[in-house]
């Protein structure tokens, strides 16, 4: 087996935790993360991992949170020919405007 294939096979079986690099973090998010890390006496890395686990519901043994705020509109669609006509008119391209 070629060395690069053996290396990749080994790495998949013995993979260390994944690493990510974030770029273009907005200043307000950076400030908030730094403030929270300081308040909670955590490293930025640990704080971000904790936030991701909580937001994704991915903490070991955690059940993802289920939201019900839109349940009332489920299966509430009503066919309306007037709305369909209005939407069709909006989809038409006015070729004179695009010359």
Image (cartoon, rainbow, N blue to C red):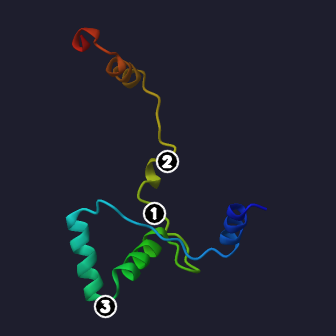
- Where is residue 67 drawn, in percent x and y? 45, 63
Q: Is residue 37 left or right of residue 80?
A: left
Q: Nearer the viewer, residue 63 or 48?
A: 48
Task: Provide residue 25's location: percent of width, then percent of height.
Answer: 28, 63
Q: Name the residue at 26% across, 86% down.
A: 38
Q: Residue at x 34, y 80 (%)?
A: 44
Tag 1 and tag 3, C-beta contact below 8 Å = no
In the rendered image, the residue lying farthest to the bottom is 41
The numbered dot on residue 15 is: none
What is the quadrant of residue 93 in the picture?
top left
Q: Residues within 10 Å of mark 2 (few under 14, many from 20)?
A: few
Sequence-wise first label, 1 or 3:
3
Figure check: 80 above or below 15 = above
Q: Residue at x 38, y 19 (%)?
A: 88
SS at mark 3 in the image: loop
Which residue in the protein does label 1 denote?
67
Residue assigned mark 3: 41
Mark 2 and mark 3 residues within 8 Å of each other at the beta carbon: no
Q: Quadrant of the N terminus?
A: bottom right
Residues packed near mark 3 inside 10 Å, few (<14), some (14 to 19) or many (20 plus): few
Residue 2 point in image, percent of width and height: 74, 61
Q: CA distance from mark 1 to mark 2?
A: 13 Å
| Residue position for label 2 | 74
Q: At x 29% / y 83%, what residue is drawn?
A: 37
CA–CA distance in space, label 1 to label 3? 31 Å
Query: Which quadrant is the C terminus positioned in?
Result: top left
């Amino acid at each position: 087996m070629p060395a690069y294939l053996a290396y990749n096979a080994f790495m998949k079986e013995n993979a260390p935790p994944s690493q990510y690099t974030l770029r273009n973090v907005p200043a307000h998010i950076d400030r908030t993360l730094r403030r929270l890390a300081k308040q909670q006496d955590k490293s930025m890395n640990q704080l971000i991992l904790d936030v991701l686990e909580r937001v994704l519901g991915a903490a070991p043994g955690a059940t993802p949170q289920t939201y019900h705020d839109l349940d009332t509109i489920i299966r509430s669609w009503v066919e309306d020919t007037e709305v369909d006509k209005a939407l069709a008119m909006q989809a038409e391209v006015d070729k004179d405007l695009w010359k």
